[in-house]
Image (cartoon, rainbow, N blue to C red):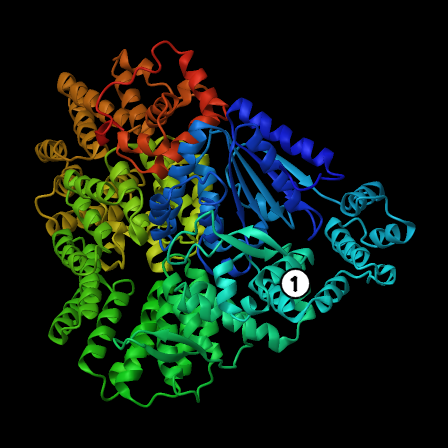
Amino acid sequence: MMAAPLRGRSNPMTRVLSTVRGAFRSGAAAVVVVSGPGGIGKSALVSHACWEAAAMGARVLHAVCDPVAQVSPGAPVIAALRAGPEPLVGVAEYEQILQARDEPLLLAERIAAVLEAAAGDAPLVVAVDDLQQADRVSLFVIRTLMGRLIGLPVVWLFAARAEQAALALLGAQRCRVELVPLGPLADTDMTAIAMDRLGHAPNEHVRDLVGAAGGNPLLAVQILHSVVRAEKAGSAASARSVPLEFTAVIAQRLADLPDATRDLAALIAVAGRPLPLRVVTALLPQLPDTGWETVLAQARDSGLVQAAESAESAASAGPAEPSDSALAPTHHLVSEAVCAALPEHTIRTWHLRLARHYLDAARDPFSAAAHVRAAVTTGITTAVPTAVPTGDAAGAEVLLTRAEVLLAAAEQLTAASPDDAADLAAEAFAALTPDHPEWPAIGRRCLAVLCRTERADEAIGVADALLARLDDADQAGAVEAQVSSALWVAGRLDELLARTGRVLNAAGPGCEVAARLSAVRALARTRLAAGEDAAREASSALDLARASGDAEAVALALHAVGQAARNEGRHHVALRAFREVRTTSAGHHLAEEITSLQFLDRYDHAQTLLDEVRAAHGDTVGSILPALQCAQIWQDFNLGRGDEAEAGARALLEIGQQLGNGVYALDAAIVQISVALLRGDAVTAAARLDFAADLPGADAALRQPGLTVMRGWLAVARGDLSGATAALAPVAQGATRSCGYWPLWPCWMGLFYEVGTAADDQAFAQTVVDVAELAAERTPGVASFEGLALNVRARSKGDRELLRQSADILARSPRPLLRGFGADCLGRALLADGDRSAGLALLDRAWDDYHSADARVYRDNVRKVMREAGVRRAKWSAATPRPDTGTDALTEAERRVALLVAAGHSNRSAATELGVSVNTVGTHLRSAFAKLGVQSRVQLANVLHREPGALTYTGDARTRAGM
């Protein structure tokens, strides 16, 4: 039962519940955003709506965000899974979810699986209160869940100061959105609240007091609490003297409390969140001696403290049981007002005691960091004692400074929430002055966090501050080695070379430092120096690293060797280097190994590795997931699976946006552009090219070759031959001196040669021939490279026999575009020579290969040639473009996903059935919903059921070639 009626909110409540009922009836998702200033009643409305939804038979997940939990990744959402009388998860599953808090993608996946199952059994309401105080990981998880639970009866109920905070989470989500702004209550409603609290009609003086609250129900309730207390005490004068300002009301009430009760109220206010009674008694050991039950009753009667369900941080040692009793502030504004009435030293004392609790008992550096941060101003070192076992039964006492506490939290947050980790590390470094004896050690650890979280500018600032005070060459070199990784990620390669060069040229860097600096220099040179020069430097760096015995230096040098070899088109060498570095660095170069296999036409082996990773790790594999997703989209694109490649590219861009990591966005955009151009959609290609040109995160040396090829190809599509030549000729001419592997890709050679010959630019065409032959020489035994080299050489010489050999070799390529290209070129040549039968047979084969890859431009050109030869084929009539909407608009991959989901599969089980990621399933499903004009899985099933046999699913869905 609800504690009190909700006054003055009948219309907003009607709108909320109408949206809830509509979502439940339709089986579609909906979003409700309740907004308004603090104390206006958002939380009360959300709580009542959750109660009403539960009465309708819905499962409810109610998360409340707070400032302390902001430093604990995903705490509000995680804790909500175990809240209430019927938690959504049991203890064992809850612990599994807790273990994933350092990997946001895995955390989101595990929570999504729980909610998807819950929504499959009954409608689901996910309420998030005080959204403006949510931590970054919670926002990421919520945004991911909204996409993952598409089409299910899920109502997202957000309460926030400003509605923009909630609307920003929607992204591409297509669902009903109901905005419910709350304003001040009317005087009649305020009077009704007074009658509820007093038990009788308020007199004129009380009405005046309540009217001074300006329609804010929280302020009115606090004033009425004071009136009630005065009436109980029989003091009419006290009732008349109730202050009209909210903070004054709270200060007066706090002052009226006995000392022990005041301490309790202060502790709860400073904590800012529910504290279990066992924690309260530990922090206030004197309370039992003063009459514990009396103190509790006084605190509750004061209106400053209320009973609550235990909500220890989700980062604590174990899940809090719902039966745990706790105390909490009645409202966060009450907590703020109590703190405003307390002396500064009292607030600091309580923050430090809370920090000690989270360090000692809960082993939770995140919450400890939040309290230490609040307790001490920047630049002041405050000792926080904690017991640390040392093998002696009594243990030992050590001092942890504010900086150390913040840094401990930062180091644990590095993977889960890089931005939060970097903020904490920067604050930790600022907490100490250089004359503190621990400053250098703290600085090195802060630098490591800033480098790992890719905060280049801040990392360089910390490094320069340290270097200004370091005289030891080895220590200075170690700092430069650390900061060089940040410079590498930021693409500040010239600065990296300048800094590392100064250290290496100075006297005295030790062997390990010199090895690391040489290795990272070599890695930088792979993006700045011509292929041979970069390869020589990488080889020398590897020799130095192996001699030093430093594993990190060896890994960096191997990465440089592999990158330099790839840039030169020596893919056998690159594969060996990436395979070795992957086995010595916990799999973080698996994506590079897979890409090297693709360049060697070993797509079956590449897919085996991708499948093994997915089978071993599920849908998420930590920080290497975007890299592997990138490898998968190139796998799909090169094997002619345009729909899958385009969907995978969209999923990769979504992952990048969720993680705040756009490293692979360039590859995703280029795949999207390429698919659009193959389909003859120059408008879409141009729009995506503009998007790619504005992408952050990749330096010009890496960005320009790929984008330049796309510009040239787009010019070809528009019939601008001179523009195409101007774009592509420099790329081909600089291929042997390139700092990237784009110019040597076999799929571009045919395009380059066509442009050169069509423009009658013999120099350009000959350059293409030379580059293609060099690439084949450096990658022997690979059909894609050897066949293309023979093709352009044969055409430049007019050698039909050589052209036949090239077609035979390209027929062994796993890439359908190259198979079709070989048959296309030979077929046209034979047709021109009068060998009609053989020429048409080859053109038929080319049409099939182009059609299988959805390369409509090339397919239609072949059809045109055959028509001019007087040939018609029945299969051509079936090759019509898909419509934009309706079931015929679905790609094969979208259709398979839609059929499985309509048949009752969850996203996860559909992903397992199809052998793809859950992110890819979500991308296909959102696209299918848009094309079919549906918003729920029930509607999806109804649409597909109207097609005879639509729900018949045959074949081995796990065969990637069929997807």
* Quadrant of the image containing the N terminus: top right
Choose between 697 and 530: the one closer to the eye. Answer: 697
Residue 114: x percent and y percent?
Answer: 39, 38
Residue 826: x percent and y percent?
Answer: 16, 28
Tally of numbered tags: 1
Q: Is 208 on the left or on the right of 704, as rendered?
A: right
Q: Is 571 on the left or on the right of 425, as rendered?
A: left
Choose between 557 and 378: the one closer to the eye. Answer: 378
Is residue 292 visible to the viewer in this orientation of the structure?
yes
Where, by quadrant of the figure, is residue 948 drawn?
top left
Q: Considering the numbered disc 1 on the image, is that residue within a helix, a strand or a loop?
A: helix
* Quadrant of the image containing the C terminus: top left
For image coordinates 53% across by 41% down, the residue present is 170
Q: Is 202 on the left or on the right of 761, as rendered?
A: right
Residue 748: x percent and y percent?
Answer: 26, 43
**Direction right: furthest residue:** 204
Is residue 722 visible to the viewer in this orientation of the structure?
no
For image coordinates 53% across by 69% down, the residue present is 284
Where, by quadrant of the figure, is residue 753 drawn?
top left
Identify the amino acid type marked 1. Glu
How packed is label 1: few (under 14 Cα within 10 Å), some, or many (20 or more)? Answer: some
| Residue indicated by mark 1 | 336
Residue 852: x percent and y percent?
Answer: 26, 26
